[in-house]
Image: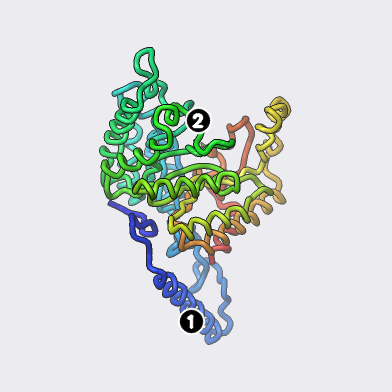
Amino acid sequence: MQRDPKLPRANHRPPHFHYFRRLSRLVCLVAAIVLCAVAPGRPAFAAPGAETHPPRTLRDATAGLFTIGVGISDRIPERPADWPLLTAQFRAVTPENCLKPNPVQVTEGDFNFTLADAFVNFAVSNQLPVVGHCLVWAKDDRTPPWFYRDGTNVASRELLLQRMKTHIDTVAGRYRGRIAMWDVVNEALDDGTNFLRPSGWTAACGEEFIGKAFAFAHAADPQAQLIYNDYNNELSGKREKLIRLVRLLREQKAPLHAIGLQGHYEIDRLPLVELETTLAAMRELGVKVVVSELDIDVIPRSRWWADGGKYRDELAKLDPYRDGCPPDILQRQADQYAQLFRLFRKYSDVIARVSFWNLHDGQSWLNGFPWQRVNYPLLFDRKGKPKPAFDAVIKALN
Ligand code: GLA
């Protein structure tokens, strides 16, 4: 089984580990400076192909820092045109949809693994560890409705937990040893004033369903690394809930190995300070972080939800970069990606993995969500060619 080397199961590295790692980096840096000084005329950043040059792939640039991954179409095994970019740049893959509860078990007992089997076989044969996403999605519109029903009644706590166990046993058990990491629970924290988002899960089981999901996942695959995944949990409103959840799971002795910050950002609105506060808080708690679904939308979307959705008609027609993204926007995006990756590098003792959500701009979900527009949120353009943001990220990691 391929494991993410930066994400330990239970033990955390002793404090002196980080000290020695920093010391060894310092020694390497000094050695590099000395080498440059004794080799006059050799530029610090030479052209590709020269004897010394900066890494040209995300894989190389992130080596020793964190695993670089990507959420990718379920259909990747049938898309050979995407394979070179994927395997040259990334070290881990998350299937975009095929392991979610709805596609896997849309009616009770009727499991469908056609796409997931092909995806996992493809990933294993390309030595790409898989992130399974996700065993429980704590949102009613993302949970097959039968889960919550018992005939005409609402399912009891016992029935719901038994269904959860069957689902997790069947899915995580099927890929035991072949799926390295699982997003066990997705999006359970409430955006409003509650601790947890009200759902069929909380109605029947209260807070305990999250810990149960982790226990079932661990029993189904004791080697898998188990993640709690959510959006906006780096922001102050949800950070406190995240911290509370980590403490709660600890009290329950739930096998939580990392928390996932989805990282769906918008240009000019990167929450860098808040994000750093969350990373520091997770470091303090001794819990690892994965940035699980990273992108930077160049057409800010927050107004879609503002003021009861009153801007939606206007926004639905907004498609400003239909004929191409202006260079100044691409440059701003590049600068902001660089800021982000400098922060990730600073917290590389805490961050185990950074995964983008989709391979290139043409495949991004943000072309269709929350409305249809031509978007440019990733590091590679529609032809799979590096954008200014790619160069900026490579430089930021150097
Ligand atoms: C959320 C989910 C993902 C995916 C993205 C958008 O972040 O966790 O599975 O659906 O939204 O595509």
Q: Which amino acid, by three-letter code, is at mark 2?
A: Pro
Helix, strand or loop status at disc 1: helix
What x and y, as percent, mark residue 112?
Answer: 32, 28
78 to the left or right of 173: right
Give the residue at x 31% y 35%: 168
Q: Is any atom of residue 383 visible in this view? A: no
95 to 250, vertically: above or below:
above
What x and y, as percent, mark residue 106?
Answer: 37, 23
Image quarter (top left, top right, bottom left or bottom right) of the C terminus? bottom right
Residue 198: image tag: 2
Splitting the image into 4 quarters, where does residue 334 fall?
A: bottom right
Give the residue at x 44% y 52%: 90
* Mark 1 vs ligand 1: CB below 8 Å: no
171 to the left or right of 264: left
284 to 147, vertically: above or below:
below
Q: Which amino acid, by three-letter code, is at mark 1?
A: Ala
Helix, strand or loop status at disc 2: loop
What x and y, as percent, mark residue 390?
Answer: 57, 55
Between 259 and 101, the one lying in front of the other is 259
Between 159 and 268, the one lying in front of the other is 159
Name the residue beneath numbered marker 1: 31
124 to 391, vertically: above or below:
above
Splitting the image into 4 quarters, where does residue 396 fall?
A: bottom right
What x and y, as percent, mark residue 330?
Answer: 66, 50
Task: Give the number of the mark in front: 2 or 1.
Answer: 2
Tag 1 or tag 2, which sits nearer the N-term? Answer: 1
